[in-house]
Amino acid sequence: MNLATAFSASTAQHKGQPAILWGDRTFRHEELWAESLKIAAHLGRMGVKPGDRVALWLKNCPEFIPAFFAILQAGGVVVPVNNFLKSAEVDYLLGDAGVNLIITDSTLLQSAQQLTLPNLQAWNIEDAAQLPPGTPFEQTARSESDLAVLIYTSGTTGKAKGAMLSHGNLLANVESCRIMLEAVDHDRFVVLLPLFHSFMMTVGMLLPVLIGGSMVLIKSLHPPKNIIAEILQHGATILPAIPQFFRTLAHAGLPPNQPLRLCVSGGAPLPGEILREFTARMHVPLIEGYGLSEASPVVSMNPLAGPWKEGSIGVPVPGVEMSVQDDAGQHLEPKQTGEICVRGANVMLGYWNQPDESSKALRSGWLLTGDIGHRDSDGYYYITDRKKDMLLVNGINVYPREIEEILYQFPGVKEAAVVGIPDPRRGEQAVAFISQTEGATVEEKALLHHLRAKLAEYKVPRRIIILSALPRNATGKILKTALRQSLK
């Protein structure tokens, strides 16, 4: 069994049923299957061999799904690319993954052609319309242990690491989510978050496709009434999103006869204020979950039947174990604080070409999440802090070290430190502190221009604060705690 054969089996069982609802268009399961076979045959003619990494650089669109499965059918490995990244950032990812082919569309083709990797081919998915239909194609045999997706997640050094997810990892997580959400083939999942994100890739795409359900692929996110209109028009039943959207939805309001039966918050911690606000205004369960790319990604969730505990990331999903451990790997008792660790068939194979980082993240079969927390006497888990120095901006990981390195490249910057502050719309936002070299004057506008040229927009600090010197401890380490306190 692999993701492609699972897709084939689901298609055979759900012919004639909608798979994607895109504005006024409907794509049925058998149409997606036929399109993916056609693209897979073309990839084979382009030289894609089993194990080759193929990048997928697309915004949310119906073509994303058959392209994703076509890569797998050809025996390749999908490398989803964050479409907010700049060319230099994409160059690094593709170079690290050893990608020779990138699938994109006309809106990103120019950016793809600016990539500097030698021997890199860029193929416009829109050209699939000219491919001959019904091209004979035999799927490449792949097992559950074979690599399926290489999804990049930033490390504490600021250099992205490729989490290796096997067919078995993703199939296991889809099944865990199916059970936990009680998902069935007439469920319609709202897809408004980017499909390159692991949360949406598994919960918003793989789950509905593999159970014969459908995706309500949102065409336009602004204004929010567009999303509400599509939820109502298409009878959407399950809405996975990041916390900030549920505040927007609560204020926008849904009519009493709306079709949603469940909302799932992921990608970032769900503030109690948003949960209370949503619950007071809406009559739909909003349950918080937790995951990370290295776990395919869903680890835990508040049970659909309850109880739902405010501030809790819930209980492990079926097939997944969780534990709170100390630095020595000892399992801690309820209410004791330590690192949250995860074990199960959903846990990655390791980091691509980074054995040292893999051994740091995987200990005795447990994935060390880098999140600090505890569990209560009922087995519910809580995150209280992050071991990793990381921000979550719109549910996407942002690592201060990466931004700091770009800041240090600017003439006149002597010291740099980036911290996160809460933001009601984005979850968190970055704030940069710098000091200047003697005699230098750093212009904030010029520094921001420098950052925007090298970083995705969501990584760019919203404020730059210039100090005479940054606070340090006795060993010379910059005191980020003091910097955060200064912002309150």
Image (spheres, rainbow, N blue to C red):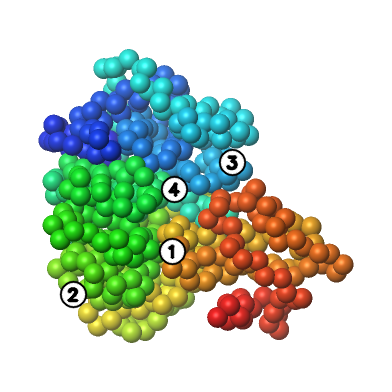
Query: Left of 335 or right of it: where is 483?
Result: right
Residue 91 seen anywhere in this rendered image of the structure: yes
For badge 4, the amino acid type reads Ile
Mark 1 against mark 2, which lies toward the viewer?
1
Q: Which residue is under mark 4?
A: 151
Instruction: Identify the residue shown where x is 22% and y is 54%.
Output: 238
Mark 2 touches mark 4? (CB < 8 Å): no
- 305 to the left or right of 119: left
- Can residue 261 be seen here? The reply is no
Query: Which disc, if any, is residue 425?
Result: 1
- Quarter of the N terminus within the rendering: top left
Helix, strand or loop at disc 4? strand
Marks 1 and 4, how far apart at CA: 26 Å
Q: Which residue is mark 2?
A: 307
Q: Is residue 297 left or right of residue 436?
A: left
Secondary structure of the residue carrying tag 2 is: loop
Crowding around mark 4 (Cα neighbors within 10 Å: few <14, some 14 to 19, many 20+) is many
Q: Nearer the viewer, residue 352 or 478?
A: 478
Q: Tell me residue 65's x, y (percent).
A: 32, 37
Q: Is residue 462 above or below residue 120?
A: below
- Please name the amino acid that badge 2 sits on: Pro
Which numbered disc covers residue 96?
A: none
Residue at 18% across, 59% down:
255
Residue shown at the point (79%, 57%) measured from the top left: 411
Crowd band around label 1 with a 10 angstrom C-alpha radius: few (<14), some (14–19), many (20+): some
Label 3: which residue?
Answer: 87
